[in-house]
Image (cartoon, helix red, strand yellow):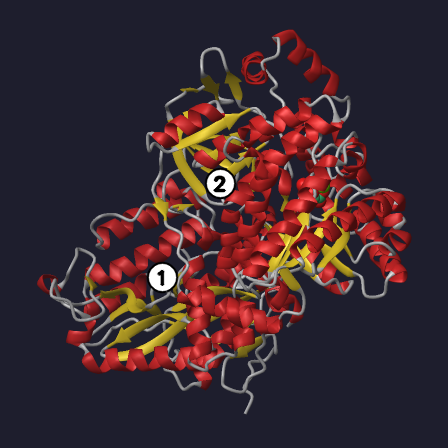
Amino acid sequence: MQQQIKQDRVTLITPTAPVSVAAHGGRAKCLQRLIRLAMPVPVTVALSFDAVRDAALGNLPDMAALMAPFDPQPLLSVRPSSESADWGGPSAILNVGMNDARFVSMSQVMGEAAAARLYLRFVQSYAVHVARLDPDEFHLPDIADASALRVMLAAYEAETDEPFPQDPAVQLAEVLRSMARAWDGTSARLLRQAKGAPVDAGLGLVVQAMALGLGQGECGTGTVQFVDSTTGAPRITGRYVAQNVPQMDKTDAEGALYLTRDPRGASLQDRCPQTFAQLLDCGALCRQHLREEMQVKFTIDAGKLYILDAVRVQRSSRASVRIAVALAEDGVITRQDAVLRVEPVALSELLHRQVDPSAPRNVLVTGIAASPGAASGRIVLTANEAQASAARGEACVLVRRETTPEDIRGMHAASAVLTMRGGITSHAAVIGRGLGVPCVVGASDLLIDRKSGRVVAPDGRTFAAGDIITVDGTTGQVLAGAPPMLEASLDGAFQTLLEWADTFRDIGVRANADTPADAQTARNFAAEGIGLCRTEHMFFEGDRLGVMREMIFAESSKDRRAVLDRLLPMQRADFAELFSIMEGRSVCVRLFDPPLHEFLPSDKAGMRDLAEQLALPLPEVAERVAALSEYNPMLGMRGVRLGIAIPEIYDMQAQAIFEAMVAVGAKGIAPAVDIMIPLVSAMREVELMKSRIESVANLVAGRARATLNYRLGVMVETPRAALRAQDIAAHAEFLSFGTNDLTQMTYGLSRDDAGRFMSTYVQQGVYAEDPFHTLDIEGVGELVAMGAERGRRGRPDVVLSICGEHGGSRSAIAFCRDHKFDYVSCSPFRVPGARLMAAQLAL
Ligand code: PEP
Ligand code: MG
């Protein structure tokens, strides 16, 4: 039978009372669930969101009716109950109803000190939270007795010109009004909106009788949970404070006891085995029926257990995965639920070391969080120093204005990378994510004084090369020193959860992987294949850079071919290794993309080295380098334009791919290879390249007497390629949208320079988000959708994918699902998160 007290906005919580999360908040609903499970919950009344809204306006419910169910009149607690516990709320206020008369009567039963403590606590929280007095004037005294109480009550009267209210109904009314108003405060509102609360989020309040332990026997209060908040492993933890136990039996001055049997001192389990067992039963019931790991708040009153409240256990990312998997394995929730319960960012945290959240942070600058995880090391200012440092076995942080392909070996050697320039798709960011190296970019407030070898923070602090700093690529902060870290942890639960996710998702997830090491990472994270292998990154390995430079300086096609013949076996070996690692899974090899001058030295010392290597006079080298430089290299001779103007490079790459296929095929692996042409803007480019690549394939196949099965496709990363996708698709079996360049060209916004003003743009709302970070669905997305549709018109079974940095983000995955793409491809370390997000979107 539904029991109600006058207004239905004030509801006595019974098993059948109309209590809902939407009207009364999560805490009220949870308490009803506990009551339905026949748990010993003290009398509780819920005030609805509407009742609290009225209270904020001064229209309080009928106090007599509200207090009627509490008979004989106990002390009361008032707790907030919003729709989501994450949205916060005003502090709970306990011991409402405490006054001079109760103090006298309770002193006789429980002793003056215990009664004074209750009264002092109430006066203190009433003064601070209800009367809004200065908290510094209302500290709890060391000794709780009648005289301390007199002092505090006098302080209250002095500050308010009124005696402390004695009528419990008045006290309760004021508590309700102040909590209702606190919810309306500007900072509370902003805080909860930042956590996703709607503008009109309501607050419910829960008024509950307090079980105080007035009688004889065990009395105390505590919290217990049954899993470890850090690891998620089963473990009973919590705190129990006994109220009236002899001092000698206590384990600390406050009377805290161990919960479980412990050789170090008294425990609740030893002292009250039956109550303890009952508590365990309540925990098990909660888990089973609330389908969640809960922290249970309880009181023991004269040996009798009361359950006051239960909240979801706070948990680390690691624990969130383990708890979800354990609940599903025990049949408490479904596998779908487990997959939906874990935040994809939690997975990303598990893949990397993190700064211990409880450690103090000495922040020297904040930039863009470009590659997650944290690492500490000594400052080095050049790639060479980074390599030297790694050779000495010393962790280092490579600090550069920006990185160029020349820095890649230094980035490999560094524990972390920090740049002053660049955005989320800058060179440093892309390589950092690929390598799994923590990286902060665009820390434009930092100065590097190359001459003195110093780095100057915005507050003037200077750090010399060799000083230790920490790059937190998860938050974008750079910290002085080396704070404690939490290790990465890929346990069985992580793998299990992802295996379950894979059974639910309906879009492929591949990895962007450039080297065999990346490919191995991609395999470890169960990527279905490689969606983008940026082959130019292979030219920075070992001594290939020198050979590349010779090739660039070659005078004639014949000379160039001769140098490329030296690169051929290296590329062939790279591809053979990639194909072997991927064991028949698709590998999409993108032909050479960047402008050639990226391979040339940018400073005097580098030019001198090059002059020596090529046995050319320095001025000639300098002149040739200058001649190769372009005003706008990202829009210059790169990608397919190089393929057409200097065809020997693509010829060599195609030959290396095909010969690697033959070699791997001979070992019994059938490689699935996609060859991708970058930066296409016209159908004829594809036609020309296609016939050239086909003739190389025929040559290799003829020589090896083998059949070569490969697909040829196009990277759609210029707006014109998207617009002309229909005729381009006639020559391309797949279209992969390179949304980094497509964003750059659609906005006319340099991906390397945008970092300078991006934060101003986002702050002023010009762009809702950094479009290099979050796919601009309205603009760039429109082009992608149009390109996909037109591509399908040209070839109905054309394979569609996205391989820009957006590929690992939720919005891009959702977009690709909506447009029935075949797969997304992202950095290897984003693959687990992408697998989980794809599953969550499908469920
Ligand atoms: C792109 O442009 O989206 C892309 C993946 O290629 P890159 O980042 O190498 O230019
Ligand atoms: Mg590109």
Snapshot quadrant of residue 167? bottom left
- For residue 704, above or below residue 303: above
Snapshot quadrant of residue 834? bottom right
Q: Earlier in the sequence, mark 2 or mark 1?
A: 1
Secondary structure beneath dot 2 equals loop
Q: Nearer the viewer, mark 2 or mark 1?
A: 2
Whole-percent x and y of residue 551?
A: 66, 27
Nearest to the observer: residue 125 or residue 261: 261
Whole-percent x and y of residue 334?
A: 52, 79
Callout 2–callout 1 Cβ contact below 8 Å: no
- Label disc, if present, on residue 438 of the rendered structure: 2
Q: Amino acid at mark 2?
A: Pro
State whether label 1 is within 8 Å of ligand 1. Answer: no
Q: Identify the residue at horizontal 8%, vertical 62% (top origin).
A: 248
Question: In the rendered image, is residue 742 in sight?
Answer: yes
Q: Quadrant of the N terminus?
A: bottom right
Q: Which residue is mark 1?
A: 231
Q: Quadrant of ligand 1?
A: top right
- For residue 372, above or below residue 224: above
In the picture, measured across the screen, residue 124 lies left or right of residue 89, that is left
Q: Quadrant of the C terminus?
A: bottom right
Whole-percent x and y of residue 691?
A: 82, 48
Whole-percent x and y of residue 806?
A: 67, 49
